[in-house]
Structure formats: C-alpha cells, structure tokens
Amino acid sequence: EPLGNWACNQRKARWRLEEGKKSWMTEERIRLLDEAGFDWGTKKLGAGKTWEERFEDLLMFKQEHGHCDIPTKQGDSLSRW
C-alpha cells in the first residue's frame, strides 16, 4: 500500500471513530501519530480531496456496501463527486 493511501486511511479511520462508527483506530494510535507530527487535515471527509482520494473513497464504499450507488444523504460529498 502506498504511504499516501495509508495516511488517507488513518484519517478516515479517525473520522469514523469520532463519528461513533466502527473503526480500527484507537486512542493510542492517535497519540502515536500526533507525537510523530501526523497531519490529520482540517477538512471533513470529502472536502478538498483529489480525484484519486475520492476514487479511493468510492472503492471503500463499494467494499463496505457491495455497490457504488451512493445515497444522496450519505453525509459527505461522495454522492456529489
């Protein structure tokens, strides 16, 4: 996995944790990444992402739901991408 994808996945996992959704991210991992100076970004999922990052979001959605029919009330801009 390219490092950029890994970093993107760390951000997504933290956002899922903060939203109360199932996530493999832990407070310990957040602490370690914070101590390393990890850039969590300031935008919510979907805002200001590159095409490649949005495509990765689409693939993750498909993996989770088994399709690419994004509901317009998904909660982020993936349905508008």
Image (spheres, grey):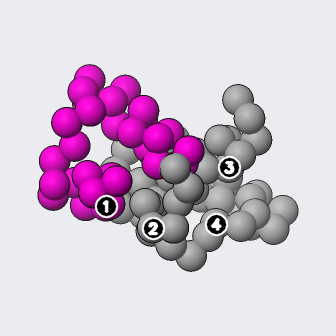
Tell me residue 50's x, y (percent): 56, 55
Q: Which secondary structure, mark 3?
A: helix
Secondary element type, mark 4: loop
Q: Amino acid at mark 1?
A: Asp
Q: Find out whether residue 68 is within the magenta segment.
A: yes
Decide: few, some or many residues near mark 4? Use Cα within 10 Å; few <14, some 14-19, many ≥20: some
Callout 1 touching callout 2 (CB < 8 Å): yes
Q: Quadrant of residue 72?
A: bottom left
In 3D space, how far apart are the residues under numbered discs 4 and 1 (Cα atoms)? 17 Å
Q: Quadrant of the N terminus?
A: top right
Calculate the distance from the C-alpha at mark 3 to the C-alpha at mark 1: 19 Å
Task: Quickly name the residue at label 3.
Answer: 7
Q: Which residue is mark 1?
A: 76
Mark 4 or 1: the one toward you: 1
Disc 2 packing (10 Å; few <14; some 14–19; many ≥20): few
Q: Nearer the viewer, residue 6 or 30?
A: 6
Single out the mark in the foreground, 2 or 3: 2
Magenta region, mostly helix, strand or loop? Answer: helix
Residue 40 tag number = 4
Q: Residue furthest top?
A: 66
Q: Earlier in the sequence, mark 2 or mark 3?
A: 3
Q: Amino acid at mark 2?
A: Ala
Q: Is residue 61 magenta?
A: yes
Q: Pointer 2: what residue?
A: 47
Identify the residue shown where x is 61% and y is 50%: 8
Q: Is residue 79 above or below residue 76?
A: above
- Residue 47: give x, y in percent of width and height: 45, 67
